[in-house]
Structure formats: structure tokens, C-alpha cells
Amino acid sequence: MKKNIKYCVLAMLWPLVSIQAQKTPIKALGIGDVLPRVTSSQVLFYPKPSISTRDFPGKLLILDLFHTACGSCVQKLARYDSLQRQFAEKLQIVLVTTQPKTEVQAIWAKNQFTKNVHLPLIASDSLLQQYFPHFIISHEVWIGADGRVAAITGTDYVKQSFIEEALRGNAGRWPIKKDIEDFEEELPILNYNAGQPNQLQPQRILYSAFWDAMDGMAGRLLVKKDSQNNVLRTRMINMAPITYYLASVGWFLKEDIVNRVIWETKRREELDPAASSLPISAWMARYSKCYESVQPLEGSGQSRFNHLRQNLNNYLGLYVRMEKRPTACWLLQRIPGTDVLSPVSATQKYEIKLPGTDSVLHVKTAGLLYALNMVAGNLPVLDSTGLQQLIRFPAIRKQDFANIPLVNQLLNPYGLQLVQSEQPIDLLVISDAQ
């Protein structure tokens, strides 16, 4: 379950109480099908004791099938609430979950992302789950004013521009979200031709292979050691090319290196979804890649990384490498003649309070550098303080980490400063092949 939640991929949890009794199997609906009337008394944040999918005549209806165990599903609800207010006369967003009302209510009141969200919510749902089966959440079903299914998407389409497009009747142009559940993680993607005579069957095959996106699959990583055949199998499904390159230099899942990637190619849009205006699901369907390799166990991790990068360069026609270059940066330094205020013992509990006050955070300097380096527009930030223990920092609001003069103003009373410098820094350089 933990793995599934990590990818926001949940097996459907069938509730004990159905919205309404069904005696015949439910047929899944697709684009152009009419959604039958679905009524539920298991409703929250709605002025009536029951809700129906026919309560919103003339409006675009978006059904958000989600689960509160999915963090990203919950975080986007404030944005949905804002869109609902913006398009109040033409749109109705209804949240749908298999969870019981009591469970949702307990979470809603204390969660920072939901406590101010008041969209109608259908709890204990099973019927809509059957009309719109899925595996990856959130699952967005768009019902036109005519009552027909207009689109089925992920959350990345629930934005102002796409709502306006749907209101103009153009949602049918969008790709349809598809989910594949019965993928066998342990089986290799590529298989040797088993129809050959036994004497032609190799004991083991070493290979690397790339191919285009697999429709309906969530991004995933599998690294499996096969001691019997003395090989290591690595598989990465539906990931951006930039993710593969970051993995090839040991920066996989590192978020604080956005300012250490140098783009010397005009092809960035097809390599990095952050550089594209496409919805992330549309970008992934067009540009993401899959990779599988079987390599000897005796090889080093660095040799495997180099192998991945060389193969990817050949596959994409790029020249990507690590280079140490003199680079403009910020150095975190101790202010000469001052002491860092109130070092904290390693056994003292972290103290984290709300930002925007005079409160402080007890963290290591690495925590501050991480936050500063997460900002794409900042120069790289390096630590030259030599401090290893927990120390006091002022509470800095997230939006202020891009404002270096303000950060300096907050740090100076604590005996610290950011000084602009030029230092040799390891950079990932992405160029076109010669």
C-alpha cells in the first residue's frame, strides 16, 4: 500500500454502503456516453440532504474521484475551490471518494489543505467508481451540459484555460486518461525468442533498451538483483529524459539541483516537462521514455550510471556530461567577528513554528541551502560555514527564498550572511551531439 500511495496509485476500496443498490453489472462509460442519474445521501458540504448528478442543469460538471491518502490529491483541492468560485455560474466540481463520511470529516477539519475547501463531496461511493474504473488518482470525469461524458483526464487539466476550452465544447480533443493495473513488475519487458531450439537459448542476456511512453502506466522504478544469473535488472517506466540524466549522475530524486543543470540545447521542451506549456500528462504521453537494462552484478554503480548516460546520449542525439565550471554563486558564511547565535544541542527537539513571525527553526545549514537551491532563479548556494550542529535560523517564508537581500537581512542577526562569489561547481551540461 505504501508503494501505491507513493505514486498516488490506489486499488479501489469498495465501501460497505452503495450509493444505490444495483442488480445488474455496471457498464463502464466512455466519451459521448450519457451519465445516468446518480443520487447519494452520503454527502458533505451541500445544502440538501442528498445530491444528484442531475442537480446542475446547464453546467459543466467535473467529478473528482480521489482519496485523502493521496497527498497530491488533497493539496490541489484549494485550487479547485478557487476555480469553482471563479466559474460559479457555469461549472460545478463535485468530489467523490470511497471513504465514509466520518473518516472524511475527521480529516477535513484538521488538514491545512482542506479546512477551507467547501466543494460538495460524495462519500462511501461505489457506483461512480464502476462507471469510471481507474487505478491512478485523482481521476477527473468531465460531464458536459448535455449530460454526456466530455473528457476523462488527470488533475493537470483542471485549470482555467482547459475549463474555458471545455465550456466551448472542445474537451473531446484531449487525450483520454487510461490506467493499467495488471502490470507484472517482476517480468522483463524484453524476452528472448523462446521458440528457438534449446541449444540456442543463452544462459543470460545482457542488454539495454529504450522505448517510447507506455500509455496508461504510472511512472515507476524497479531495481532487482538476480543472484542466480548474477545480473542486476533496472527498469524505469514513463520518466522524463531529464530524470534519466539526473539518475546517471547520482542526482535522482534530488530537487535542490535545478540551478546546476546547464541547458545548451534548444530541445529542452522535449526533455524537461518544466519547460513545456503542455499539461504534464500530455507531455508525458508525448515525450517520456522507458528504459530497461540487464547488467552484470560485478559492475560498479558508477559504471552503470555512465552506461545509462552514454546509451541515452546515443538514443536522443545529445551530449550530456558532468563538468566542473567556474560559476557565479552565493556562499553562506559566518560574519567575521560575530558568533552564530544559540547553537542547539544534537539532542534538542526540532522547533518549527509558523513563518512570518519572530520564531526560529532549529536546523542544520544544509536545510537552509536545500530551500535556497530549490528556487530555480537563484544562483547555486554553497556552505562555507563549517557548521555541523543544529543552529537557530529565522523562520523564512517559502516565497521569500528567491529574495536574497531579504534572506540576508533575516540571517545577519544570527551571525550569518550570503556573499556572492565565483566557485568551481559540478554542473550537468546538456548539449546537442556534435
Image: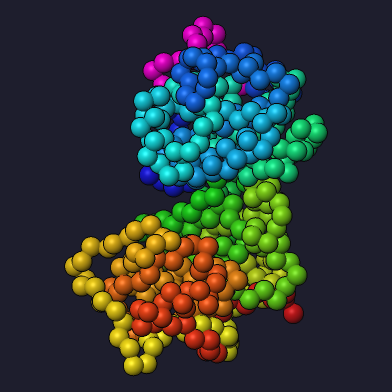
Up the image or down, 284 lies above or below 61; here it is below
400 lies left or right of 85? left
The quarter of the displayed image where residue 17 is located = top left
201 lies left or right of 282? left
Queried whether the magenta region covers residue 27, the answer comes back as yes
Q: Tell me which segment is drawn in magenta.
A: 14-28
Image quadrant containing the C terminus: bottom right
175 and 38: which one is in front? 38
Q: Which residue does the image show at 57% across and 28% down from the upper left?
A: 94
x, y percentage for residue 102?
Answer: 36, 25
Image quadrant containing the N terminus: top left
Residue 9 in sight: no
40 and 70: which one is in front? 40
Q: Which residue does the image show at 44% across and 22% down from the upper left?
A: 124
x, y percentage for residue 137?
Answer: 53, 38
Q: Which residue does the image show at 54% across and 50% down from the upper left?
A: 219
Queried whether the magenta region covers residue 371, the answer comes back as no
36 and 93: which one is in front? 93
Residue 255 in sight: yes
Up the image or down, 346 lies above or below 233; here it is below
Q: Residue furthest front?
A: 358
Q: Main secondary structure of the magenta part?
A: loop
Q: Which residue does the image show at 37% across and 92% down from the upper left?
A: 336
Up the image or down, 45 lies above or below 5; here it is above
413 and 129: which one is in front? 413
x, y percentage for residue 367?
Answer: 39, 69
x, y percentage for residue 11?
Answer: 45, 33
